[in-house]
């Protein structure tokens, strides 16, 4: 479980290294600021495509082999980013890294499959704590490394880490071959696996609801963390290392993941979901006042609260969707995460546009609006009497 936590965190961190460095990367390669801001979005679009095309294959392909293949390709993509000197190859390699970093989402349902029902939320929460810690540490790690050695060193360091993680999984991860499809083998079975996913989404209302919740949550998450480094530099005059410390403080929100898993195991999913949504709205609105007052401490506290809320909702959602039948969990996770990450990519891509058009006030309005949209959907649970 510890190895899976580290592996998922290391893989998913690759989606976020570029996020606080877009200005430096854009300046080095001569990119327009808005185009440079889409780097994170391109990586996450690749992740979304990989979630649909690769994670769904976990219901068909031997899981250990699938994970190791994605690690090898992620390593090659990271090396490609580090060596890029023009925009086109840079964006292509970013897409490749996002596509193949989805090996993390093969590992999460893999360990959920091994956990007993009564402890599934706790086990998933522990592994997701590693994943979420990787997400949150990616930004400060990137800033610290880039501040001393340049932005390319960040991707070389991650490529080396992928080799270490791959070697550990090769030695320790058990093999697991899913049941063979009755619809054929090879390409035919794979195409039928993909073709079955729309039907699964129609048949599983809980998956639809949790995907909608987390899609809006993740859009808000990326909106905040794409624009916060820009705002901190402009409004507070923070250096790249100081912004890294701010992002490191935000990583504290990952500590909520194991607690959220245990609460979900005890039947508090609906309450936990509502509280998380309210905290998203409050965090964005309060951040407007914190920026106006010039309080960096208040901003750091609100970043922790926002991240904790989003992560608590994620753990609750995955606890629910992993309660489905084992033979479809790869596809269910693929559906859930694909919807979530395409929304997240949109939040990242629109973040710089919103900030340049409306400043931090625009970000506050957009983020609070996303939170209110979640609450509007959440309210239908009570009208229909449905669980969450």
Image (cartoon, rainbow, N blue to C red):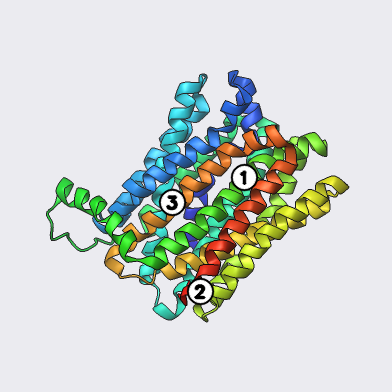
Report how far apart the C-alphas of labels 1 and 3 lie in the structure. Answer: 16 Å
Left/right of residue 224 with respect to residue 327 in the rendered view? right
Please state which of residues 113 and 40 is positioned toward the viewer in this rendering.
40
Depicted 162 relative to depicted 104: above or below: above
Left/right of residue 201 with respect to residue 309 in the rendered view? left
Report how far apart the C-alphas of labels 1 and 2 lie in the structure. Answer: 30 Å
Q: Which residue is mark 3?
A: 339
Q: Secondary structure at mark 3?
A: helix
Question: Reading the chain from its start, which is encountered first: label 3 or label 2?
Answer: 3
Q: To which quarter of the image does residue 240 belong?
A: top right
Q: Which residue is mark 2?
A: 383
Query: Which of the labelled discs sits on residue 336, or is there none?
Result: none
Q: Could you classify mark 2 by the number of other residues whose Cα lies within 10 Å: few (under 14), some (14-19), or many (20 or more)? A: few
x and y percent of residue 336 in the render?
A: 41, 57
Depicted 4 relative to depicted 87: above or below: below
Mark yes or no: residue 224 visible.
yes
Left/right of residue 292 with respect to residue 188 in the rendered view? right
Residue at 52% in and 75% down: 382
Query: Which of the labelled discs sits on residue 223, or is there none?
Result: 1
């Amino acid at each position: 479980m510890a190895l899976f936590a580290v592996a998922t965190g290391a893989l998913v961190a690759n989606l976020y290294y570029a996020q606080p460095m877009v200005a430096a990367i854009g300046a080095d390669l001569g990119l327009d600021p808005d185009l440079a801001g889409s780097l994170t979005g391109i990586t996450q679009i690749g992740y979304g495509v990989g979630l649909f095309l690769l994670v769904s294959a976990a219901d068909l392909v031997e899981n250990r082999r699938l994970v190791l293949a994605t690690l090898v390709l992620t390593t090659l993509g990271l090396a490609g980013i580090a060596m890029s000197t023009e925009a086109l190859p840079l964006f292509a390699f970013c897409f490749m890294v996002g596509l193949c970093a989805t090996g993390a989402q093969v590992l999460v349902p893999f360990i959920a499959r091994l956990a007993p029902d009564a402890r599934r939320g706790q086990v998933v929460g522990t592994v997701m704590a590693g994943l979420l810690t990787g997400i949150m540490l990616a930004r400060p790690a990137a800033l610290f490394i880039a501040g001393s050695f340049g932005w390319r060193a960040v991707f070389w360091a991650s490529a080396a880490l992928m080799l270490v993680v791959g070697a550990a999984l090769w030695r320790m991860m058990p093999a697991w071959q899913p049941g063979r499809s009755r619809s054929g083998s090879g390409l035919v079975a794979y195409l039928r696996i993909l073709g079955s996913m729309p039907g699964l989404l129609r048949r599983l209302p809980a998956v639809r609801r949790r995907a909608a919740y987390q899609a809006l949550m993740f859009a808000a998450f990326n909106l905040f963390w794409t624009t916060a480094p820009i705002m901190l530099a402009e409004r507070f005059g923070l250096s790249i290392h100081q912004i890294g410390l701010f992002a490191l403080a935000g990583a504290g929100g990952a500590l909520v993941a194991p607690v959220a898993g245990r609460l979900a195991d005890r039947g508090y999913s609906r309450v936990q979901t509502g509280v998380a949504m309210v905290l998203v709205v409050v965090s964005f609105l309060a951040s407007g006042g914190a920026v106006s007052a010039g309080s960096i401490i208040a901003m750091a506290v609100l970043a922790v609260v926002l991240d904790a809320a989003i992560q608590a909702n994620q753990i609750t959602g995955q606890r629910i969707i992993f309660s489905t039948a084992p033979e479809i969990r790869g596809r269910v996770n693929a559906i859930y995460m694909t919807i979530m990450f395409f929304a997240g990519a949109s939040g990242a891509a629109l973040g710089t546009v919103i900030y340049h058009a409306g400043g931090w006030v625009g970000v506050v309005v957009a983020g609070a609006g996303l939170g209110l949209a979640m609450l509007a959907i959440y309210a239908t649970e009570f009208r229909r009497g449905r669980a969450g």
